[in-house]
Image: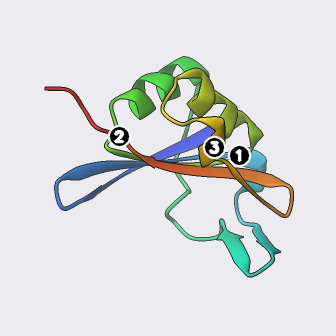
Amino acid sequence: MMLVKHHTKDGRDIVAVCDKELIDRKFEENGKQLDLTSEFYKGEEKDEMEIGDIIRNADIVNLVGKRAVDLGLAEEVISKENVIMIDGIPHAQAVLIQEE
């Protein structure tokens, strides 16, 4: 299961998606850190189809975990070049340009 949370900043829709089992954990490697203990990632459980719709319509996406990143790849909001690994956990961010 994945969690999704909406944030709005400067009129932009920012969506954080995280594999549920990673919540409340921290990962560090080579000076990089994923801190999943903050409220930023603590959203609602939703199914893949709902999350796919949400991330396709976001302005910025932040994806953490294998399922979240795989969904971002499948929905083509990120590419493999966007994915970094931190302590074995895949993570990707992207700014999406919405067509008018």
Residue 86 % position (x, y): 78, 63
Q: Helix, strand, or loop for circle 2?
A: loop
Against 63, residue 45 (above or below) is: above
- Neighbor class of circle 3 (other Cα within 10 Å; few <14, some 14-19, many 20+) is few
- Neighbor class of circle 2 (other Cα within 10 Å; few <14, some 14-19, many 20+) is some
Q: Earlier in the sequence, mark 2 or mark 3?
A: 3
Query: Could you tell me which quadrant the N terminus lies in?
Result: top right
Residue 79 % position (x, y): 58, 35
Real-space Cα separation, disc 2 to disc 1, in angstroms: 24 Å
Instruction: Name the kind of residue labelled 2 in the image.
Output: Leu
Residue at image position (59%, 43%) is 3
Res. 96 mark: 2
Q: Earlier in the sequence, mark 3 or mark 1?
A: 1
Left or right relative to 34: residue 76: left
- Neighbor class of circle 1 (other Cα within 10 Å; few <14, some 14-19, many 20+) is many
Real-space Cα separation, disc 3 to disc 1, in angstroms: 24 Å
Residue at image position (34%, 38%) is 58
Residue 66 % position (x, y): 76, 40
Left or right relative to 69: residue 30: right
- For the question of whether residue 43 can be seen, the reply is yes
Query: Could you tell me which quadrant the C terminus lies in?
Result: top left
Res. 81 mark: 3
Q: Which residue is mark 1?
A: 20
